[in-house]
Amino acid sequence: MVAFDRNFTFYIVPAAFILLFLLKLYSFALGGRYLDPASPQKYKPAIADADDLDPKTKARILRAESAFANGLETISLYAAAVVSVNIAAVNPVVANALAIAYLGTRVIYNVIYVVLQDEPRWALARSATWFTGVGIILTMFLLAGSAVY
């Protein structure tokens, strides 16, 4: 593919960031009436204490919030990995494939965690998806290190 030969990894970083905020939008769509913009940290406790939300909706909102927090914890490491493969001039096809694969793991992780994990048996798949994403990040760093060594 000719388009894959051009490095577009930097564009995947904002896409991953937007993906994070889709989780927030989903959470607010389900429970936004509990959000106090002056005290956003009170949102999760307000959801947990809400008596008028059914348990399934409440659980999805809280998992969406947790998935958002998890994404924030890994996105900076991912962005650094993207910078490293670019500075080290890693093959663009490989760098692009890894960047897209990481984004794919985040999409799958979010769907499993927020929606499918109404069934607890999905927890192992969620963890495996998270470790795959982290493995992709580590692979990007290792390739960058190999390219400059």
Image: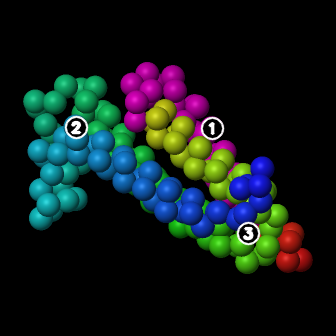
Of helix, strand and loop, which one carries label 3?
helix
What is the spatial separation of the Cα atoms under label 3 and label 1, in whole angstroms? 24 Å
Q: x, y percentage for residue 111?
A: 46, 35
Which label's residue is closer to the chain start, 2 or 1?
2
Q: Is residue 99 magenta?
A: no
Q: Is residue 101 left or right of residue 124?
A: right
Q: Which mark is residue 30?
A: 2
Q: Earlier in the sequence, mark 3 or mark 1?
A: 3
Q: Which residue is mark 3?
A: 85
Look at the image and give the residue range highlighted in magenta. Answer: 114-141
Which residue is identified by label 1?
Answer: 128
Q: Residues within 10 Å of mark 2 (few under 14, many from 20)?
A: some
Q: Which circle's residue, 3 or 2, is located before the other in the chain?
A: 2
Q: Residue at x 86, y 72 (%)?
A: 147
Q: Are marks 3 and 1 in contact (CB under 8 Å)?
A: no
Please tell me whether residue 134 is drawn above or below residue 63 in the rendered image: below
Task: Name the kind of residue labelled 2 in the image.
Answer: Leu
Q: Is residue 129 magenta?
A: yes
The residue tagged with tag 1: helix, strand or loop? helix
- Figure check: 60 above or below 23: above
Depicted 86 relative to depicted 3: above or below: below
Q: Amino acid at mark 3?
A: Val
Crowd around label 1: few <14 · some 14–19 · many ≥20 (10 Å): some
Residue at 72% x, 72% y is 86
Mark 3 vs 2: CB contact within 8 A: no
